[in-house]
Amino acid sequence: MDLIDIGANLTHESFRHDFDAVLDRARKAGVAQMLVTGASRAGSEQALALARAHPGVLYATAGVHPHHAVDYDADTDARLRALLRDPAVRAVGETGLDYHRNYSPQDAQRAVFEKQLAIAVDLRLPLFLHQRDAHVDFLALLKTARDRVPAAIVHCFTDSREALFDYLDLDCHIGITGWICDERRGTHLRELVRAIPAQRLLLETDAPYLLPRTVRPPPAHRRNEPMHLAHIAAEVARDRGEPVEATAAQSSANARAVFGLKPAPASAS
């Protein structure tokens, strides 16, 4: 298979001791390329450093997650704009709203989301989006910018049918993770993935988080990693009623189109 993981937090400290092995396992599982998520100023810089060290295999996003909205200032805005001009950085984000944790005040989250929407509009870059328990405010803000950016990716979609169709009505792409494998809270996604048009479907691990609960045997360390994207693809394909090869090929074609990726270099395959 030819898979692309559109959301992996490879700057996480849990990957430091075996990073090269993680990439090797991903390659052997058919994951040809990965986007390293930037979720803070420092994390975005680290994501770019990884992408530069593995050209054509790793790419990066640059943004500030709503959890870190209180840390956003003028220097952060300027630094993100600089990072996003690097050709290895392919989207603005992870940005959005999170009213589930509220690690940053909601008014700060909204203000910082608006600033990053403005960056995406100014630089004509896709948006890599996070939303949890904030759909109404999130959708209202997204609508102000959606027709002025080339693409919008709703990362790690876990919401309702109504939210899904709101996003599809805005021509958003939908990222599906191992959440679909969680029998406690993700079973509704098994039906909803059938409603995602083939051209809008993207696959991701959100590693090291969201280890698919149906992986057997489960790793003792409970860390998710990009190699498990093959498992997620198989689960999504089954729920969509299509061959896994078709799901993999379509989602990868979508990712390459959305993020402007060329196929991975032959030496990396």
Image (cartoon, grey):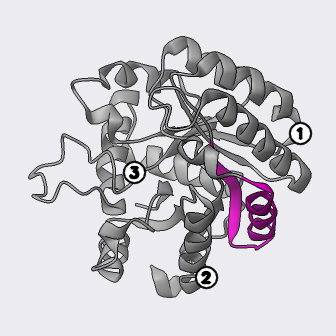
Please name the residue shown 32% across and 62% down the image.
227
Which element carries disc 2, helix, strand or loop? helix
- Whole-Å distance between the Cαs marked 2 and 1? 28 Å
* Image position of 199 (left or right of 114): left
Q: Position of residue 83 (x, y in %)?
A: 74, 69
- Whole-Å distance between the Cαs marked 1 and 3? 28 Å
* Image position of 74 (left or right of 191): right
| Residue 78 counted in the magenta span | yes
- Where is mark 2, residue-wise? 52
- Where is mark 1, residue-wise? 148
Q: Position of residue 135 (x, y in %)?
A: 60, 20
Q: Amino acid at mark 3?
A: Thr
Please name the residue shown 30% across and 22% down the image.
187
- Where is mark 3, residue-wise? 205
Q: Amino acid at mark 1?
A: Arg
Picture quarter containing residue 207?
bottom left
In the depicted structure, whether residue 221 falls above or below residue 126: below
Residue 56 in sight from this viewpoint: no
Picture quarter containing residue 200?
top right
Between residues 69 and 24, which one lies in front from this camera angle? 69
